[in-house]
C-alpha cells in the first residue's frame, strides 16, 4: 500500500472511531427521554443524573440559568406566580400529551434529528389534538444527547424551541 493511500485509510478510520456511540441510537434516546418526561414521578429540573444522561452541556447550562432566573424573580416578587422550568418546558405544554410516537429519525454524526407526534387523549385538556415535535441531538462524550427541541406550531401552541423558552425563563424580572 502506498503512503498516501495509507494516510487516507487512517483518516477514515479515525473519523469513524470519533463518531462511535456507546449508547442507544438517537430514536431510542428520544423515546427514553420523553417516556421519562411523561412519568409524573420524574422531574428533569431536579434530577442531575437524568440531565447528564440526556441533555448536552449547553442545554444543562441553559436549564441551570433558567432555574436561577426564576428563583431570583420569585425572591424579588414574593407571592406572585413566577414561571419556573419543569418537565412541561421540555414538552412545550403545561398539560402533557398522553402519548407520543417517533415518526422519523435521521442521523448524520455528530448530529441527528428525531421527529415525534404528540397526542392528547380524551381525558386531557386537549382531547384529540396532535402536535409535531423535532428533537435535535448531538453526539457528545460518546452518546446522543438532546441539544434542542423544536415544538411546531399547532392549534394551541406557537412555534417554539426549548433553548428559546429557557432563555425567556432566565430573563424573568
Image (cartoon, helix red, strand yellow):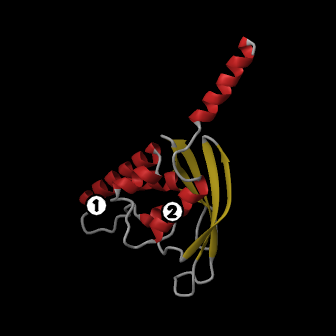
Residue at mark 2: 32
- Badges 1 and 2: C-beta atoms under 8 Å apart? no
Q: Is label 1 or label 2 in front?
A: 2
Picture quarter with the N terminus: top right
Q: Which residue is mark 1?
A: 74
- Whether 72 is drawn above or below 154: the answer is above
Quarter of the image for the C terminus: give it.
Answer: bottom left
Q: Is 72 or 152 nearer to us in this picture?
A: 152
Residue that appears at 65% across and 23% down: 10
- Residue at the image position 59 percent from the left and 53 percent from the top: 26
Residue 66 position, x and y percent, is 38, 53
Question: Visible in this render: residue 168?
Answer: yes
Pointer 1 local density, CA inside 10 Å: few below 14, some 14–19, many at least 20? some
Q: Residues within 10 Å of mark 2 (few under 14, many from 20)?
A: few
Q: Earlier in the sequence, mark 1 or mark 2?
A: 2
Residue at 40%, 53% (x, y): give it: 51
91 horizontally vs 27: left or right = left
- Whole-percent x, y for residue 49 in the image: 36, 54
Question: Residue 101, position in %: x, y?
Answer: 62, 69
Residue extending farthest top? 3
> Element under label 1?
helix
* 143 vs 162: above or below: above
Residue 171 appearing in the image: no
> Under tag 2, what secondary structure?
helix
**Mark identifier at residue 152:** none
Looking at the picture, does residue 111 appear above or below residue 155? Answer: above
Q: CA distance from mark 1 to mark 2?
A: 32 Å
Asked whether 156 or 54 is in front, the reply is 54
Q: Quadrant of residue 153?
A: bottom right
Nearer-the-camera pick, 87 or 172? 87
Amino acid at each position: 500500500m502506498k503512503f498516501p493511500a495509507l494516510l487516507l485509510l487512517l483518516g477514515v478510520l479515525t473519523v469513524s472511531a470519533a463518531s462511535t456511540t456507546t449508547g442507544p441510537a438517537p430514536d431510542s434516546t428520544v423515546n427514553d427521554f420523553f417516556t421519562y418526561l411523561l412519568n409524573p414521578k420524574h422531574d428533569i429540573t431536579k434530577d442531575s443524573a437524568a440531565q447528564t444522561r440526556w441533555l448536552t452541556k449547553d442545554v444543562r447550562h441553559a436549564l441551570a440559568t433558567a432555574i436561577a432566573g426564576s428563583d431570583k424573580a420569585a425572591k424579588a416578587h414574593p407571592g406572585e406566580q413566577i414561571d419556573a422550568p419543569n418537565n412541561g418546558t421540555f414538552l412545550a405544554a403545561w398539560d402533557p400529551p398522553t402519548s407520543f410516537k417517533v415518526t422519523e429519525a435521521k442521523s448524520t454524526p455528530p448530529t441527528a434529528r428525531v421527529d415525534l407526534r404528540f397526542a392528547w387523549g380524551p381525558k386531557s385538556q386537549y382531547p384529540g389534538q396532535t402536535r409535531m415535535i423535532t428533537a435535535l441531538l448531538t453526539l457528545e462524550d460518546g452518546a446522543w444527547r438532546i441539544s434542542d427541541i423544536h415544538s411546531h406550531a399547532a392549534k394551541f401552541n406557537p412555534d417554539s424551541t426549548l433553548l428559546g423558552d429557557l432563555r425567556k425563563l432566565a430573563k424573568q424580572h
